[in-house]
Structures are given as C-alpha cells and as structure tokens.
Image (spheres, rainbow, N blue to C red):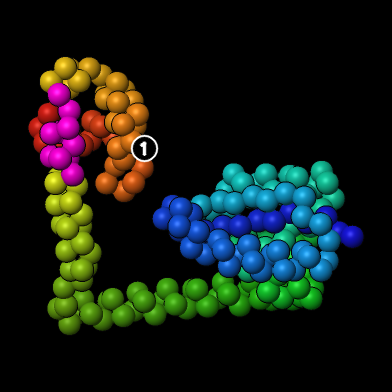
Amino acid sequence: MTNFIAYFRVSTERQGRSGLGLAAQHRKISDFVAGYGTLIAEFCDIQSGRDDSRIELQRAIQLAKRENAKIVIARLDRFSRRVSFIASILEQGIGLVCAEMPNATDFQLHIFAALAQEERRLISERTKAALAEAKRRGKILGSNGRILAAKNRRTADEFASQLRAKLDADLLRGSYSKIARHLNDAGITTVTGRRFYPQTVKNYLKRVGSTQ
C-alpha cells in the first residue's frame, strides 16, 4: 500500500475558520486514500495559490521526500497555479496525485495545469479589457468597494466606542499588552471574532482618540 501525505489549501482566513472549501477537500482525499493506501500526515495552508513558498506546502514536500510518500491533493489548483512549479516537483521524483482525477499521468497533470494557467491568463485579459472599456465610457469604477469600505469603517468605529466604554481609567493607564490580556481573559473578541493583541488595542483606541 502507498503512503500518502494530504495537502489542503484555502485562500482566506475566513474560509479556514469556517471550513468552507476544506470539508470538500477532506472528503475527496479521504475517499481516495481509503482505496489506495495510508494517510501518514496532513498539511494545510491558508494562503493564495500564487505563492509557492507556502510553509505547510514546503513541509509536505520535505516529508514526502523523507518518507518516499506521495502528495495527494483534492484539486490541482489547491497545490499550485504555476505549471513550472508542478513540473519541478514531478522532476524531483515526488509523486503527486489529484483525488478528482486519480488515474492522471504526470504528462496529463502537466497538460491540465497548462490549460488552467492559460485560462486564468485569458480571464485576466478579458477583465482588464472590460474595465478599460468601462473607464473609456466614463463609468465610475470601484464604487461598490468604496461603499463597503465606508461601512466597514463605521462598524469599526462603533465597536471601538463600545470597547472604550468597557475599559476603566486605571486599565487605560496600563500598557496595551495589559489591556489585551484583560480583554482576552474576559472572553471579549475583536469585531472579526479574533483575539486581542497590543497593536489591535492601540488601533481601536486610536479610533476614539484614546491612545497613550
């Protein structure tokens, strides 16, 4: 039986926290490995596929070399978006298996990766052309983004005001680290549901004019 190392990737922290995209990848890989071998390790990056220096990806590659194992991915684009990188991995003798097309040869993986890369290039060109045409016609670009940004600023300002009201004068005279520890110990999270850090505290207090 073959030893496999599973590699998963999602693009954003929100997807990572919610499991969006990860659940489908886990399911595909688990179903594949059950019939072909043993899963000896799992690695997951929450990062863009354009960056091939991803930490967990590099760890998966190094372990695959040491254990003479194959890397299994749910889809080819979860591994890399560059044909040259995929080619370099295969040239090193590292086995790469795509769960959604398990019978694909190395040659076929090259072809699929090349087709996907070319499609992304064409999409990018069409998008740029459409934006240029819209601009030529006088259409204001990015209005939705500006509206969303303004909404996010208002939400952050409101949260900062509420947060300031929860801090007494003695605590505000302390360090940002002390305030962050107090908030974390109290189970209070940031507006995005994360832990507080000294810089986070400073940023919020700055919004309400209450920095040290």
Find residue 188 and report its horizontal and vertical position in percent: 30, 37
- Locate the N terminus and report the quarter of the image it occupies: bottom right
**Which residue, given by chain and number where applicable, does mark 1 sit on?**
195
**Is residue 84 or residue 166 the one in the foreground?**
166
Q: What residue appears at the point 22 percent right and 17 percent down from the top-left corner?
A: 174
Q: Residue furthest right?
A: 1
Q: Is residue 162 magenta?
A: yes
Q: Residue furthest front?
A: 186
The magenta stretch is 159-168
**Is residue 24 or residue 121 the one in the foreground?**
24
Find residue 140 and report its horizontal and vertical position in percent: 16, 73
Q: What residue appears at the point 26 percent right and 81 percent down from the top-left corner?
A: 133
Q: Is residue 165 left or right of residue 194?
A: left
> SS class of the residue under badge 1?
loop
Task: Report the magenta stretch's main SS.
Answer: helix
Q: Is residue 28 magenta?
A: no
Q: What residue appears at the point 10 percent right and 32 percent down from the top-left corner?
A: 209
As drawn, 167 above or below 46: above
- Locate the C terminus and report the quarter of the image it occupies: top left
